[in-house]
Amino acid sequence: MYNLKLDKFHGHEGPEGAERWLEHIEKTFRELRSLTPAERTDWNVFIRLFKRRFVPPEYIDHKKQEFTDLRQRKMTANEYYRKFTDLSRYHPDINSNPAEMLRLFRVGTKKRWRSMATTTPCESYQEFYEILLRIEDSENMSSDSDEEEKDGKQKKDDKGKGQTSLGPRQTQNFKKGGTSSSSSSGSFSASGQGRGNRFAGRARGQRQGDGGRSRVPFCRRCNTQHFGECRYGNSGCFTCGQVGHRAVNCPQGQQQRP
């Protein structure tokens, strides 16, 4: 064991850890075939003493009960078969009886699968397991076909929705203080967004054909269009900034107005 550099057993691994260690050692010996008949006898004595010390009877009884109460539920056929076979070693009386093993394995199978599999005769739980695999594969194929059909139908519905949803284009009419929408097929909104309009998207205050040189920026603060710093909320004039009059009566604005 030291030459093979196997895992060490310290004695505090618990029953399951002790069993895993012992199974690993036995598997290594079987692969190497290194035990002589005399050594094999000594090893059997060691196994019996080891289990008596580190695998108590209470643990064995618990595993026996887990074996007899085992049910497939959400496990696959392969997972159920592997767990059933592993737990059967704790119950040698049932493990040595093929008919009882078949009965117990069949009882723990899913009810739907059990009713389908009983129509095929079998003599061992291994044969019953092969039947379960075929049933499981058949159900998986049916599920895949249903998914493909569902996906194809969904694509067809989406394509139909895309064809029937064509209609008047929704245009937005921006106004001071809020927005409104219109669905007229040939209307021209205040923002210039209408079907067939080659000047769609031009800001208010931009003249047609001026190349965008007179574009007036839109202010998010006062919701209007103007140049320069926004004076919305100040007590002074919006045009000159002086206090005492408003922009509509501003002398500077009247001089600039054509």
Image (cartoon, helix red, strand yellow):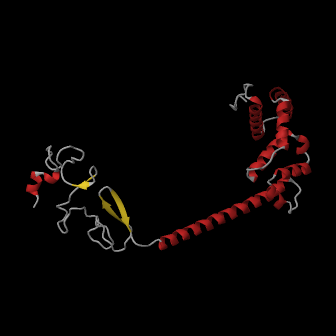
Could you tell me residue 117's position as x and y percent? Answer: 83, 60
Quadrant assignment, res 199: bottom left
Q: Nearer the viewer, residue 248 or 212?
A: 248
Left or right: where 255 falls relative to 132: left
Could you tell me residue 32's position as x and y percent? Answer: 75, 39
| 14 in relation to 104, above or below | above
Q: Is residue 42 visible?
A: no
Report the number of discs: 0
Q: Is residue 139 visible?
A: yes
| 32 in relation to 237, above or below | above
Of the 4 image quadrants, the one containing the C terminus is bottom left
Could you tell me residue 156's position as x and y percent? Answer: 55, 71
Of the 4 image quadrants, the one containing the N terminus is top right
Q: Nearer the viewer, residue 23 or 107?
A: 107
Left or right: where 92 falls relative to 9: right
> At 21% across and 62% down in the image, what residue appears?
205
Left or right: where 42 falls relative to 217: right
Quadrant assignment, res 193: bottom left
Q: Nearer the viewer, residue 126 or 239?
A: 239
Direction left: furthest residue? 255
Could you tell me residue 191's position as x and y percent? Answer: 29, 64
Left or right: where 55 falls relative to 164: right
Quadrant assignment, res 183: bottom left
